[in-house]
Image (tube, rainbow, N blue to C red):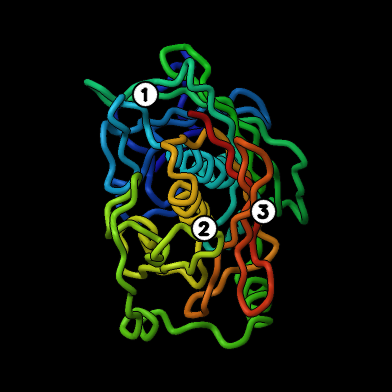
Amino acid sequence: MHTLDEVVRADQALRWDHTIDRTLVHRDSIAEVLLTDLIRLADTEFLVAAQWPRSHRVYRPDHDGRHDPMLILESIRQSGLAVSHFAFGVGFDQQSLMRDISFVLDQRTEPRALRRATNLAITVSCRDVIMRAGRLRGMTITLSFAADELRFASGSGTIRWVSPQSYTALRARGGPPPDWDQLRWNSVLPPRRPSPIRAAADVLITAEPAPSARRRLVVPLDHPVYFDHPLDHAPGMLLIDAAWQAAVEQRADGARLVGCTLDCPMFTELGVDTDILLSPVSSDTTGFTVGQRGHETASGTLRVAP
């Protein structure tokens, strides 16, 4: 089987006719693969094609056909993984750690999902590349999103790669690894109600009698998107979505997410009570922290627009 880099691409034209190999983006379900092509422009510059569907199992467009901004974050995550494997030869036995991720959306030029899927061209630049013994150990990617030749979003993310042995040692600091099947069998999800942006089955915070600044995280281990495959910690996509759901309920003003940041200095463990605490930063920005056992495992900001 040829790698993408071995295929002659003289026209440098992106393709949207099929997805890339799902293993490149660490997905089990083909339906969750957003990337369709990847072209190397230079040693650390790439052009990525992605397609956003007209609808999605969780990230559905709004009544005006505007895509859920969480698709930007998932495209950043998938791009970092795919570029690592494709361009830097990272082995599939290596473990990835997304240390931070962010995006900014321009509502004036963003595409709509009204009559067809949305084809995207994403420019990816790699910086602060860390190589040790000829292996990629970390880098930060910056991305620019365009649809119909209109730029509408930018983003960034820092990814780290560790060997299986190093990952095992790193996770051992938090105690014995969780038993995925036991956690799943023993998990009892609290009652949840639909939110303005999610169906009840996709809500990640507990129901409260009134919007609160502190919400308990719900971790649905059987969820087909948040846990497309078994993980030993709560993923960043779940943490951001939960914080955004909490902010939507607290604001109750129909505001839309147009930017966010997330930093993950620690793992957010499974099977442990987890709280999300919201704090106002400005009229359009809310800060959030993720806490477990008195420790802050993640933090970030959410920026909204009417």
- The single residue placed furthest to the left in the displayed view is 115
Mark closest to the chain's N terminus, 3 or 1: 1
The residue closer to the viewer here, 65 or 19, is 65
Figure quadrant of residue 118: top left
Sequence-earlier tag: 3 or 2: 2
Residue pointed to by mark 1:
119
Q: Is residue 79 above or below residue 11?
A: below
Look at discs 1 and 2 and give the one toward the viewer: 2
| Residue at x 29%, y 33% (from the top left corner) | 53
Amino acid on which disc 1 is placed? Asn
Residue at (59, 47) in percent of width and height? 89
Q: Horizontally, is 109 left or right of 261 in the view?
A: left
- Left or right: residue 197 compared with residue 288: left
Residue hosting label 3: 263
Residue 57 coordinates in the image, percent (x, y): 27, 47
Helix or strand or loop: what does disc 1 sit on?
strand
Is 18 located above or below residue 81 in the figure?
Answer: above
Q: Quadrant of the N terminus?
A: top left
> Is 7 rendered above or below residue 133?
above
Q: Residues within 10 Å of mark 2 (few under 14, many from 20)?
A: many
Camera-side mark, 3 or 1 = 3
* Gap in angstroms between the C-alphas marked 1 and 2: 27 Å
Look at label 3 and name its amino acid.
Asp
Report which quarter residue 7 is drawn in: top left
**Residue 167 seen in render:** yes
Q: Are marks 1 and 2 in contact (CB under 8 Å)?
A: no
- The secondary structure type at the circle numbered 3 is strand
Instruction: Please give the count of numbered marks on the rendered protein.
Output: 3
- Please name whichever residue, 115 or 137, is drawn nearer the observer in this view of the structure: 115
Residue drawn at 54 percent across, 28 percent down: 105
Residue at which label 2 appears: 239
